[in-house]
Amino acid sequence: MHQNPRPDPPATPGELMDQLARVAAAYYRHFAAAASGHGLTLMQGKTLSLLTRPRSMRALAGLLSCDASNVTGIVDRLEGRGLVRREPDPVDRRVKNIALTDQGEHTVRLIRADLMSGLTALERFSDQDRTALGALLDRAFPDTAAPSA
Amino acid sequence: MHQNPRPDPPATPGELMDQLARVAAAYYRHFAAAASGHGLTLMQGKTLSLLTRPRSMRALAGLLSCDASNVTGIVDRLEGRGLVRREPDPVDRRVKNIALTDQGEHTVRLIRADLMSGLTALERFSDQDRTALGALLDRAFPDTAAPSA
DNA sequence: TATTGTTATACTCTATAACTATA
DNA sequence: TATAGTTATAGAGTATAACAATA
């Protein structure tokens, strides 16, 4: 054995930002492929994934980072395929709560499973690796709290 | 001092995947805001960012993960605003190489700067944190190589 | 008065298929 | 024959502005 090779120099903030750009693109590439496998677009798949509990149109718009007027069309198409339903809010009659149907629950589970099996490297991470990556991402994106429930 | 609180249990693969979903969404939310500040859409901003050197329409389609026919319109709009130009390839007359104009170089620098200042937490990472995060992301997304040059 | 959801509008992104010029 | 880029088309996502119903 000879001397250790020089360790990689630390990435610059700009290089790390570029890497995050590639990771974000790769994540959505995998997600779009998983959604497409069930006949859904990226936004339709994202919307289903956000419905871990019923949410108002307004809340969905916030979670999707788009204007509320867009959500009408997205939910229309999901409703037309029987994946979600609009329910009247019991206390505020202006509000409609969007909930997954049984078929929607089934579809979102399939999409998640396909996504996981597409991210094989991530599946093989140890507990320690996952904890370390999760902690670093929490610090890098502190504005990224998990939505309630 | 009393006993240490129980450490967080390791995140499950599914929880880490959800966190990556939120991180990817946050990255694009910041990127879209930076591009929008210069009158550009997300895809237009992404395209400018990929032109670190001239690239063919085909290569751009691959890097953008979309069909080549879409790139025509995106490049049309960028060209109409004087941010890129189409150059004939010297060896293959079918190919057009897309290059940033001086104004395009300027704009992409401003977008990158705005994006960096939007990701303040990332800017404050130590060399060690950046190296650790970069290494974990490389392992989690091994299919995510930086494009040449 | 303010908010929720919808509609109308115009623009951008998207994949598919067909076309041309070139290889 | 195959490939690079474009065009035509139809559908989906996008923000803005205006609207009705409700708070």
Image: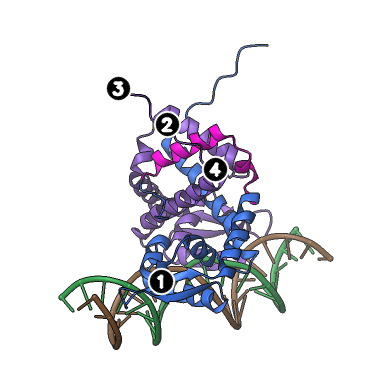
Chain colours: A purple, B blue, C brown, D green
Tag 3 subunit: A
* Kind of residue at badge 2: Arg
- Identify the element where label 1 is drawn: strand
Which residue has dot 1 on it? Answer: B97
Q: Nearer the viewer, mark 2 or mark 4?
A: 2
According to the image, label 4 marks what residue?
A12
Task: Please check whether the numbered discs 2 and 3 fall on a single chain.
Answer: yes
Q: The disc labelled 4 sits on which kind of residue?
A: Thr
Secondary element at tag 2: loop
Q: What is the chain letter for disc 4? A: A
Q: What residue is pinned by disc 3? A: A1
Residue at mark 1 shares a chain with residue at mark 2: no
Residue B90 placement (x, y as % from top left): 35, 74
Of callouts 2 and 3, which one flags the residue occurring earlier in the amino acid sequence? 3
Disc 1 residue type (three-letter): Asn
x then y, percent, for residue A1: 30, 22
Of mark 4 and mark 3, the one earlier in the sequence is 3
Inter-mark Cα distance, 1 to 2: 38 Å
- Tell me the magenta residue range: B118-142
The reply to whether residue B105 is in sight is yes
Badge 2 is on which residue?
Answer: A6
Q: Residues within 10 Å of mark 4 (few under 14, many from 20)?
A: some
